[in-house]
Image: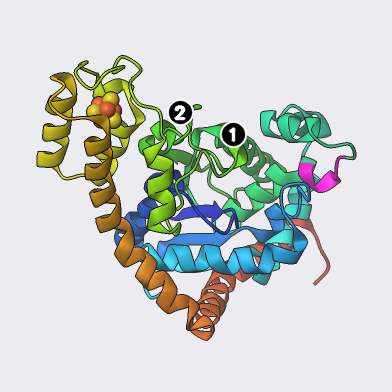
């Protein structure tokens, strides 16, 4: 049975790009792969860039990311879902892979170069980030990895490390393949400045747990097709981020009404945004209510994560035993 692995950054407040691009995908893959779908909140990765993550809030963000995924429909009875630091085998395998990885290859990683550029002092952990990621995936002998396009280089390194280990110590790991969620690549930021991204700040994102009135305030001032200078000017919904959002949140009759109304100047942009807001409210209200219920019951969340970590270790331990034996560590 194929096995899926994906790591989730503990950003605390996922946006609709994360939701459509990753979180809903996790739920869908969970239905298909069951306990062979393994997801973890990667808090060990988070600490590699202290400029981006405040250690004081890491635990809270990790908790919130778990809440968000449960609220989005991830069922701990069906999948394995846990926090990375609660399964120490990730770090152990990472060290074995560190010994196999040329520093030059890590220095060539685009994400490393981008992040390192912004830092005065570069933590070695930032350089090792892709090695830990390879360990995350291969610890479960996963062969399928749902990721964003920006992770392509890291998956290539994971494949190379699997080959290297197999060559050095005998056939052990599969070479995993990346699966890209198309929606994640195309969701524009609400500020109209390219792809929705947390790194661009809150003006770019619509959070799935964000209060609905705050979302409306962002939509109200969001740029539309610049061709619609006056209400009577026809527009092109394919050139408008509101048109893109309708495809995510609205039902088919609404999308048809909006697209036709935009092209014929039959509707104004404010009406169009209000119709979008109805779809967003329909999608996010139940999710936000579930999140509230989970926050009121933190023990349930922690227990579910602890159970997930136990299940993960049941898979990870024998793999590490195999690695230790093949690497020649004394028993
Ligand atoms: Fe965008 Fe809607 Fe205005 Fe068309 S009518 S430009 S899709 S906001």
Which type of secondary structure does the marked residue at label 2 adopt? loop
Q: Residue at x 35, y 64 (%)?
A: 287
Q: Taking 56 as reference, is 307 left or right? A: left
Farthest-out residue, right: 121
Q: Nearer the viewer, residue 126 or 137?
A: 126
Q: Residue at x 57, y 52 (%)?
A: 137
Q: Nearer the viewer, residue 74 or 107?
A: 74
Mark-to-mark CA distance, 2 and 1? 32 Å
Q: Earlier in the sequence, mark 2 or mark 1?
A: 1
- Residue 188 position, x and y percent, is 42, 32
Write down the residue under mark 2: 192
Q: Quadrant of residue 310?
A: bottom right
Give the total number of marks visible in the rendering. 2
User: What are the residue bounds of the magenta stretch?
Assistant: 122-126
Dominant secondary structure of the residues highlighted in magenta in the image: helix
Could you classify mark 2 by the number of other residues whose Cα lies within 10 Å: few (under 14), some (14-19), or many (20 or more)? some
Q: Residue at x 27, y 23 (%)?
A: 238
Write down the residue under mark 1: 156
Could you classify mark 1 by the number of other residues whose Cα lies within 10 Å: few (under 14), some (14-19), or many (20 or more)? some
């Amino acid at each position: 049975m194929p096995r899926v692995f994906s790591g989730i950054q503990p950003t605390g407040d996922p946006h609709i790009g994360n939701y459509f691009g990753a979180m809903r995908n996790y739920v869908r893959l969970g239905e298909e792969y069951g306990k062979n779908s393994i997801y973890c909140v990667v808090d060990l990765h988070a600490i590699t860039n202290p400029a981006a993550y405040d250690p004081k809030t890491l635990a809270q963000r990790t908790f919130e990311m778990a809440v968000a995924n449960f609220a989005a429909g991830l069922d701990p009875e069906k999948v394995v879902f846990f926090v990375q630091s609660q399964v120490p085998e990730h770090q152990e395998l990472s060290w074995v892979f560190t010994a196999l990885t040329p520093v030059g290859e890590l220095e060539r990683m685009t994400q490393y170069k981008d992040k390192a550029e912004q830092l005065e002092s570069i933590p070695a952990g930032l350089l090792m980030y892709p090695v830990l990621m390879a360990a995350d995936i291969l610890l479960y002998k996963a062969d399928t990895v749902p990721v964003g396009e920006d992770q392509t280089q890291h998956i290539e390194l994971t494949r190379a490390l699997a080959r290297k280990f197999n060559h050095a110590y005998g056939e052990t790991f599969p070479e995993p393949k990346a699966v890209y969620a198309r929606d994640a690549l195309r969701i524009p930021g609400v500020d109209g400045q390219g792809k929705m991204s947390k790194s661009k700040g809150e003006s770019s994102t619509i959070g799935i747990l964000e209060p609905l009135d705050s979302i409306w305030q962002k939509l109200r001032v969001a740029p539309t097709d610049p061709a619609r200078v006056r209400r009577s000017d026809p527009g092109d919904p394919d050139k408008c981020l509101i048109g893109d959002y309708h495809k995510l949140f609205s039902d088919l009759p609404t999308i048809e009404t909006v697209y036709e109304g935009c092209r014929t100047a039959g509707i104004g942009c404010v009406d169009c945004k209000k119709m979008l807001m109805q779809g967003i409210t329909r999608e996010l209200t139940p999710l936000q209510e579930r999140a509230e219920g989970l926050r009121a019951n933190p023990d349930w969340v922690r227990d579910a994560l602890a159970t997930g970590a136990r299940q993960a270790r049941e898979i990870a331990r024998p793999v590490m035993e195999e690695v230790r034996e093949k690497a020649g560590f004394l028993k």
